[in-house]
Amino acid sequence: MFIRIVKMRFHEATIAAFLSNFEEVKYHIRNFEGNLFLELYQDKNDPCLFFTYSYWDNEAALEKYRNSTLFNEVWSYSKTLFSDKPEAWSVERLVTLD
């Protein structure tokens, strides 16, 4: 499994537009071949700060998504709303406690 975390900061005035767009595309992203899990988080203290957390079959599955028309449309729109450069991390799960 391949885990991806993306940090995005939006202008306060564009948060509603981002959330509306995410609502429209979330199932398309989640159902993209190789995507196993998708969550969106909003920071409790900074409402302009969001994170996506996703699981992929492997790095190749994420790259297939990143090279897709769907990603191009989602990212092209989202980046017009950013107030700061996004950051992304690919991480490995080391420990899980239930």
Image (cartoon, rainbow, N blue to C red):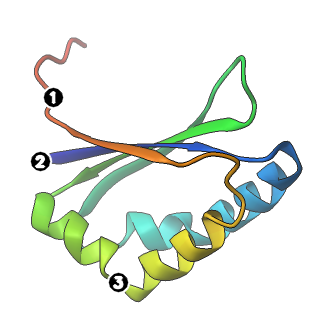
Q: Is residue 29 above or below residue 50?
A: below
Q: Badge 2, how many Cα within 10 Å: few under 14, some, many 20+?
A: some
Task: Rate crowding at label 1 as few (under 14), some (14 to 19) or many (20 or more) other CA atoms within 10 Å.
Answer: few
Which amino acid type is shown beneath numbered disc 3?
Ser
Pointer 3 with pointer 2, Cβ within 8 A: no
Expressed as whole percent of the image width and height from the top left, the position of residue 42 reads 64, 33
Q: Are marks 1 and 2 in contact (CB under 8 Å)?
A: yes
Marks 1 and 3 sit apart, C-alpha to C-alpha, by 26 Å
Can you say whether 49 is above or below 27 in the image?
above
Instruction: Find residue 26 and name its label.
Output: none
User: Mark 1 and mark 2: span between their CA atoms?
Assistant: 9 Å
Q: Is residue 17 left or right of residue 95?
A: right
User: Which residue is labeled 3 in the image?
Assistant: 68
x 79%, y 50%: residue: 15
Residue at image coords 72%, 17%: 45
Residue that lies at the very extreme toward the right in this rendered image: 13
**Circle 2 is placed at which residue position?**
1
